[in-house]
Amino acid sequence: MSKQNLNVELREETGKGVCRRLRSAGRVPAVVYGKGIEPVSISLDTRQFSEAIAGAGGRNHILTLVGGGSLDGQTVIVCDMLQDSIKRTPRHVDLHRISLSDKVKVHVPVRLVGTAAGAKAGGMVDFAMHELEVECLPVHIPDYISVDVTELTIGHSIHVGEIPAPVGIAILGDPKAAVISILGRKSAEAEEAPAA
C-alpha cells in the first residue's frame, strides 16, 4: 500500500458558510479523529487530496499529515468521504488516525480474473459484491482482492468463505454471501433428464 504526504491546515470555524467558502477557495473541510484524541477540524487542498487517493488502493492509501500543529506527522486513512453528486469532487472528509502496528478494518475492491465458463456458455454474470471488508495491518492493505472465475459454471457461485485471503489478511463478512454468480438456464441435457 502506498504512502502519501498530505498538507493540512487547522480550522477553528465550522458550519455551512465556512465550508462553502473553503470549497470556493479550492479546499475540502475535513475532520481527524481516532483513539485517544479529540476530533480536530482541518481543511485540505482539494487537488492534492484527490491525487493522494487516486489510482489503485484509492481511499485506503496511508496518508501522513504535514502541518496542523499536533497533527503533524500523524498517520491516517480515509474513513468516510462525501462527494459532489455531479462533479464527484470531495465535499467533506473524515480521516481516521491509525497506528501502523495496529490492525484496521477497510473495504477493498474485488478484481475478477479470467472469463467464467458459464458466461462463455451463455450465462449472465451477477457480480454482487464489488468490495470485501478485510482486517490487517495498515502496511498490508491490498489494492484489491483477486477472484479467479475461470471455472465458474451456470448455476454456481463463489462465496466470501471460498476466497483465499492473502498472507496477513483476514476477509470478514458472512462466509456464505455470494460474491459472484453465473445465472442462466441449465444445459439441455440436464433439462431433459428424467425427474427422480
Image (spheres, grey):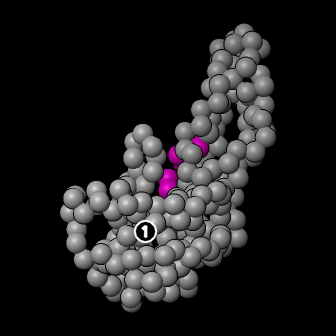
Query: Could you tell me which secondary element the residue under label 1 belongs to?
Result: strand
Q: Which residue is mark 1?
A: 44
**Left or right placement of residue 77 versus residue 23 in this view:** right
- Seen as rendered, the residue at the extreme bottom is 70
Place of residue 60 in the rendered image (x, y in percent of width and height, measured from the top left): 55, 65
Relative to 17, say whether 113 is above or below.
Answer: above
- Which residue is at the front of the view, 113 or 178? 113
Magenta stretch holds residue 50: no
For the point 33% across and 62% down, which residue is it?
Answer: 22
Q: Which secondary structure is most common in the magenta stretch?
A: loop
Instruction: Mark yes or no: residue 103 visible.
Output: no
For the point 59% across and 58% down, which residue is it?
Answer: 54
Q: Give the quadrant of residue 150.
A: top right
Tag 1: Cα neighbours inside 10 Å, few (<14), some, or many (≥20)?
many
- Which residue is at the front of the view, 98 or 23? 23
Place of residue 162 in the rendered image (x, y in percent of width and height, measured from the top left): 65, 52
- Quadrant where the C terminus sits is top right
Relative to 174, say whether 94 is above or below.
Answer: below
Q: Give the quadrant of residue 120.
A: top right
Relative to 131, say whether 133 is above or below.
Answer: below
Count of number-bearing discs: 1
For the point 77% across and 14% down, which residue is it?
Answer: 189
Q: Which residues are magenta?
A: 173-179
Place of residue 124 in the rendered image (x, y in percent of width and height, measured from the top left): 65, 25
- Quadrant where the N terminus sits is bottom right
Q: Amino acid at mark 1?
A: Leu
- Which residue is at the front of the view, 58 or 66? 66
Instruction: Mark yes or no: residue 125 visible.
Output: yes
- Seen as rendered, the residue at the extreme front is 25
Relative to 171, say whether 76 is above or below.
Answer: below
For the point 35% across and 56% down, which residue is it?
Answer: 24
